[in-house]
Image (tube, coloured by chain):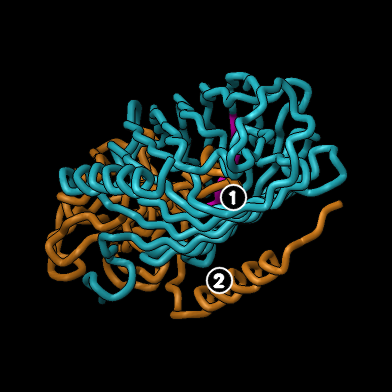
Chain colours: A cyan, B orange
Amino acid sequence: MTIQKQMAFLLVALSAVFGTQASQAAVGEIFLLGGIASGSYGTGSESDVATTRVVFNTGDKYQFKVDAGWIRVESPYGILPGPVGPLPMQRKQKGESMEHGTGTGSVGEISASGVGDVYLAFSRRILGGGAKLFRMDGGVEVKAPTADADEGLGTGQWDTRIGLTSEYRFWSAIGFAGLGWNYLGDPEWVELNDVVDAYAGIESEPLGGRLILSGWLAGNPEVVPGVGSRGVVGMGLRTAGQWRFRFQATAGLTDGSEDFSVLFAVSHGLETPTVGTRGPRR
Amino acid sequence: MMRAPRSTWFVLLLTAATCSGVATAGGHSSLAVVEGTVLEVGKQPGEGGLELVTVRLSAERPDPHELELLLAPQSVLEETGFTVQQGDRLKARIFTTDEGPAAVHKVLNLSQNSMVRLRTLRRIPLWDGSGMWQGGPGLGGQGGHHGPKHGQQGGSGPPR
């Protein structure tokens, strides 16, 4: 995909997002994220992916989100840690056609950077919400293959995820869980399994007024035959308020998982909450 | 072989610094948790001169007594979907340093399975001067997106 096509796609996506935001009285949030994921996947050598992303997220009942970023991949075996497990990449040499294959072998070293895939997600509250203790949302997420597959930055295929998320608010904590089905487009060199993914965890209420802690487990069956299923344990810290800081770390529990990943994010709520200086105070 | 990147330590230190600054800024009122049955629902002027919904509660915990709770403007309760009526059982975290009705930090209606946080721990109301809700999308709770996110490569992603 050319740069022009990528930029056109981003503009269309952003127009859709801001159009959605304007049509509802919802609180928006812009994230700036930096993340690193690293895993050996049984190869003895690490595959690293670093990302810088901008995410726009709209409000409550209806949510629309666009996630676009820049990624850098360093992988001696051409393995890209993907959202549902490691994916084998195959870098195309200029002027050569890509070989067809069915496995993860001899894919070659990848050291590349560029525009990542763009994720568009829409979800709607379907149960509870507001002041109710229980809430469930249903949604669909689409990955547009804006990353350059020839450089090993993505699969070059469209992916779709249909999922449910739910939460239950206790007096001092929130339990949350999610379940999704992933339809993964198959690149030329490997056939990917379409898999279910699931996660569940708990989050504290704001400690000391603003600090929120969370922990969770997440996993899915293997995406590439023979690689193994993915299972990770994660923990997160975030702050409340108009400017929100967020740190997350995960550790892999299975061979088919990244060894670790870390993510740091700063986000900004577009609608000023009363917290701070604006509201009535006495 | 796992190696911790320098950025991990950097973000840990930055997060710790942010949180310690937050924890020490400002003074908090004393808080207490009460639980009981609603005897009466009323209204009276509160923060910003707005008319706020009040509740007279027959508290059983921590000790039996009657007290008046100061909730929020009717418009805020309507927007968040929180309702309260005579006979409902409530659990509330209140500020105890005030004279008169006790301002409510967070209230759980056990009869209707609903909960809403109305003020910050610094007793700042989560509504604006015209009585419009400003508490964000996580209406009753901690305002949040949480948990792992399924998505982009290179990290566990932003919480939902």
Where residue A225 sits in the image (x, y, percent)?
Answer: 73, 20
As helix, strand or loop, the secondary structure at mark 2 comes to helix
* Circles 1 and 2 on the same subunit: no
- Please tell me which residue is depicted at 37% across the width and 62% down the height of the picture: A268
Q: Position of residue A180 (x, y in %)?
A: 51, 25
In this rendering, would B64 be left or right of A176?
left
Q: Is residue A220 above or below residue B1?
A: above
Question: Does residue B25 appear left or right of residue A196 in this picture?
Answer: left
* Disc 1 crowd, CA 10 A, few/some/many (<14, 14-19, 20+): many
Task: Give the overall secondary structure of the magenta segment.
Answer: strand
Q: Which residues are magenta?
A: A198-204
**Which is nearer the eye, A138 or A120?**
A120
- What residue did someone put label 1 on? A214
Instruction: Give the amino acid type for the residue marked by disc 1 in the picture.
Output: Ser
Q: Is residue A265 left or right of residue B106?
A: right
**Magenta span has A18?**
no
User: In terms of image quadrants, where is residue A140?
Assistant: top left
Q: Which secondary structure lies at badge 1? A: strand
Q: Amino acid at mark 2?
A: Cys
Q: Is A202 one of the magenta-colored residues?
A: yes
Image position, residue B16 (x, y; %): 62, 71
User: Mark 1, chain letter?
Assistant: A
In the shown orientation, is residue B68 left or right of residue B23?
left
- The front one of A222 and A206 is A222
- Residue nearest the observer in this picture, B82 or A200: A200
A207, above or below A161, in the image = below
- Residue B62 visible in this rendered orientation of the protein: no
The residue sitting at the front extreme is: A95
Expressed as whole percent of the image width and height from the top left, the position of residue B104 reads 34, 58
Residue A177 visible somewhere in the drawing: yes
Residue at (23, 60) in percent of width and height: B127
Label 2 lies in what chain?
A: B
